[in-house]
Amino acid sequence: MSKEDLKRELGDLIWKMATNLVHGGKVSPVQFMDYTLGALFYRFISENITDYCNQLMTEAGVPDADYQHMSDETAENARTQIVLSKGFFILPSQLFRNVADGAKDNDELNTTLANNFKAIEQSAIGTPSENDVKGLFNNFNTNDAGLGSTVAERNSLLADLLESVRDLNFTTYIESGLDVFGICYEHLIKMYALNSGTKGGEFYTPAEVSYLVALIAAAGRKTVNKVYDPACGSGSLLLNFNLVLGAKNVREGFFGQEINLKTYNLCRMNMFLHNVNYDHFNIQLGDTLTDPKHEVDEPFDAIVSNPPYSVPWVGDSDATLINDPRFSPAGVLAPKSKADFAFTMHMLAWLSTEGTAAIVEFPGILYRSGAEQKIRKYLVTNNFVDTVIQLPPNLFFGATIATCIIVLKKNKSDNRVCFIDASNEFVHEGNKNRLAPENISRIYNAHIQKAEVAHFSQVVTTADIEEEDYNLSVSTYVEQEDTREVIDIAELNARIAEIVSRENALRTEIDAIVAELEGGEA
């Protein structure tokens, strides 16, 4: 079985588990995501700690190393070493497998879980990993009334959940080299997006779009100093650099900021789930536009983002922002009703001289007038715009619009800008569109080669864009293919003449028949 087949099979396994719990009426889809992700994360870090400790003991010559069945007292001797290496500590009695195996017989399961989660987080207090571990289990409230009206009901559901996650057999998938926990995470986030309406986009950028954006931001590089996303959501765009360059080639790690507390916790979980160690990521909570957290870390060689579309922000209501070095170069702030260009200017400001920013944007920023036109003028005049890509519609959960990607650079060697119309580059699956590998390849190659292909890509100069009043809409520069049937006028006239001739002949015949009938009656 191929890797892709195994990946689909694993996805089906996760969906089946979801169906059993959600459609059984035991928990809502949104709750399912919170608790299942928490349980999955609990299993992952428990197995990670177990494997690490077993390896340490084996290397030290300990026969039949078995951390899972070690006494807590013995394990305590390695607490400091494990926390410094992994960022947290879990006693054998607190390991996921040991709790799950005894879940059905534990009348205080909700309290056991709450205490274990608290202990894991407290193990990092006073260490360099404290902020990376703090609050990771906040979304897993074991005493939530939504789990049941009584303790017994809550424990019953929690036991079912733990056993479902425990019984997921990952061996074949792990042996094939798949990122098992990452794939499970992606499917669960996708499930949340499907069941939570328009809010799904806060948590989930389709994997293919994330990969394309990372591919573009890393183009031409073997390493980057660090990767940054100012609206990082669950971290999928950042983590795609593991696929594109490899984690070791993101030398100083992954940086991001997220305003939503739930999503912020999910992003940190996702880092651990993808084996990014606590000392190799820095995810912060807060409003990037008014309270940026990574000023000491910029500039960044690679910036990737899918910021929220046209959300309101404080804008010129805060008189200090026009003097903020992130926004002041354009001489105007993004409109208070639409923060898209505020995020864009922020990313440009923190982009290194040799870096690339690839940003998924709402299409309105390409052509809207007013302050946004002035910001476009600033970007074009200073030759920061490298490529504009029109994506297909209906790629994102909760949003059917056709978004776009703007690629920014500070080190362009010429004043050319490439426009790519990829609106037809998709395959249709279910009720959504998706970028297939061949679609991604065609878009990426057009961006890299800056080649002109009829009805697909066009290269213009900044002077050409100036003539169009700094309109960056792809359709302004890439001629749409005329799919209407080509009509041969001469042939059409000949056919019309033939029809008229036949019609005249027919009328003559009818007149003759009528005359003959009238003559007979007389």
Image: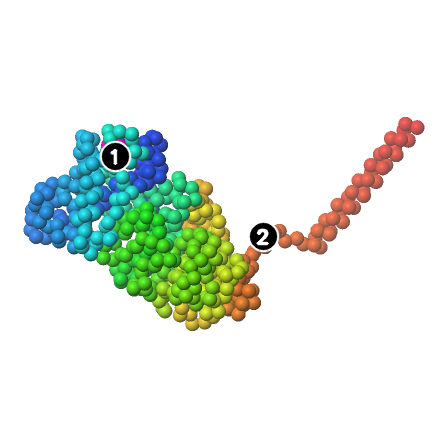
Callout 1 environment at 10 Å: few (<14), some (14 to 19), or many (20+)?
A: many
Please state the extent of the stretch shown in magenta in the rendering: 154-158
Which residue is nearer to you in this view: 286 or 462? 286
Question: What's the amino acid at mark 2?
Answer: Thr
Q: Which residue is mark 1?
A: 158
Residue at x 26% of width, y 62% of height: 252
Magenta span contains residue 157 = yes
Disc sitting over residue 483 in the figure: 2
Q: Picture coordinates of residue 117 (x, y %)?
A: 21, 43
Inspect this view and state whether residue 371 appears: yes
Find the residue positioned furthest to the bottom.
413
Q: Picture coordinates of residue 425 (x, y %)?
A: 47, 52
Which of label 2 and label 1 is nearer to you?
A: 1
Q: CA distance from mark 2 to mark 1?
A: 57 Å
Quarter of the figure that contains the C terminus? top right
- Secondary structure that dominates the magenta span: helix
Task: Determine whether the residue tagged by mark 2 lies in a helix, strand or loop.
Answer: loop
Q: Residue 385: which quarter of the image?
A: bottom left
Residue at x 30% of width, y 44% of height: 184
Residue at x 35% of width, y 44% of height: 189
Q: Residue 431: which quarter of the image?
A: top left
Residue at x 12% of width, y 50% of height: 79
Left/right placement of residue 139 relative to residue 390 reads left
Left/right placement of residue 133 relative to residue 33 reads left
Say if 522 sits above or below 310 in the image. Answer: above
Callout 2 environment at 10 Å: few (<14), some (14 to 19), or many (20+)?
A: few
Quarter of the figure that contains the N terminus? top left
Left/right placement of residue 65 relative to residue 195 reads left
Which residue is nearer to you in this view: 146 or 96? 146
Question: What's the amino acid at mark 1?
Answer: Leu
